[in-house]
Amino acid sequence: MDSKDKETKTQPGDTPTTACESCDNRECPAAQRKKGESEEDFSERRELESRLCRIRRKLVVLSGKGGVGKSTVAVNIAAALQMAGKRVGLLDVDIHGPSIPTMLGLQGAVLQNGPDGLLPVDADGVKVMSLGFLLPDPDQAVIWRGPLKMGAIKQFLKDVAWGDLDYLVIDSPPGTGDEPLSVCQLIGRLDGAVIVTTPQKVAAIDVRKSITFCRQLGVPVLGVVENMSGFACPKCGEVSAIFSSGGGRRIAKDMKVPFLGAIPIDPAIAASGDDGRPYVSAFAASATAKVMRGIIAPLLALEADAK
Ligand code: ADP
């Protein structure tokens, strides 16, 4: 915590003060200690709030299970927003499989401490922070008990100096359990969730759970992306349905949430992930990159609403 925050620390019985020096908003939820909240929790929450309130829109990318392309979609959403001229941060809190450093060619990046906290790493204009930067060995499995894990995520969120951003895209741990729950609760006031699924029935069932999860937490569902939807021929680009397709679209319709687009299986998507270049910029002229840019349209509309 820096000395400025210490000076503004509220004592029990104090009248509401401003939360921090980021803004003058006395209505801010961090301006007052919550009932039953300890001094330490209050101070931590205020510290986190002072960082997050400089971010206009906070979006979480969720999936019912791992391996459906959640990180791929998160990376490409962040890159597409950056290409649209936005100031973008990408936060990877997928504690068991932080793959964002690899997908952006940032393996081995050494984190630097700035005057205001841990500095995100630049990837062609996107500010990136990943739990992966903190793991000494990329082959190491992370075996942490729940509270330790949550403590690490909390500390991490609190320490990153994002500065002013238009969008923060958060690559959440998969599923609807404790980990994504803690992330969503810690960030608080999320502007929306993008849910990623594959077309198969079993994966699509998980989408229902993810939508219910968002509804219970009061996080608006921006929509569903169906990834690995058919196979795009590397020679002619024609997409053939190798699994049953349309599961994501159907569920989106049933659950009355927008369908944001279908991304085919394309070897170039896997290769660009391995090479550390977002597909949407490396293959900007492709039909699939167009689909990816379509996914961000409602996200851009969010910012337009804020003006
Ligand atoms: P998750 O975050 O859901 O675990 P990832 O985004 O890490 O999934 O994707 C898992 C693997 O599948 C990665 O190697 C990625 O490059 C690859 N992949 C994801 N989407 C596609 C796609 N549409 N076409 C080809 N490969 C893909």
Image: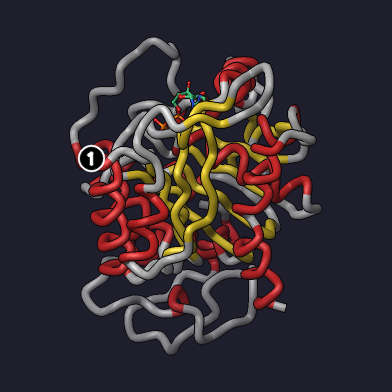
Residue 2 lies, with reference to residue 243, above or below; the image says: below
**Residue 103 in view of the camera:** yes
**Residue 106 in view of the camera:** no
Residue type at numbered disc 1: Val
56 left or right, relative to 93:
right
Residue at image x 56%, y 31%? 239
> Is the residue indicated by label 1 positioned so its CB lies within 8 Å of ligand 1?
no
Quadrant of the rendering where the C terminus is positioned: bottom right
Between 242 and 269, the one lying in front of the other is: 242
Residue at image x 33%, y 57%? 251
- The image quadrant of residue 210 is bottom left
133 left or right, relative to 236:
left
What number of labels is visible?
1
Residue 156 lies, with reference to residue 190, above or below; the image says: above
Residue at image x 36%, y 44%? 63
* Residue 53 percent location from the top left of the image: 58, 66
Residue at the limit of the structure toward the bottom, as seen here:
15
- The image quadrant of residue 12 is bottom left
SS type, badge 1: helix
* Residue 3 percent location from the top left of the image: 57, 56
In this picture the colour scheme is secondary structure
Residue at image x 45%, y 15%? 136
Between 167 and 282, the one lying in front of the other is: 282
* Residue 32 percent location from the top left of the image: 41, 79
* Residue 97 percent location from the top left of the image: 38, 26
Between 43 and 183, the one lying in front of the other is: 183
Residue position for label 1: 202
* Neighbour tally class for label 1: few under 14, some 14-19, many 20 plus, Cα within 10 Å: few
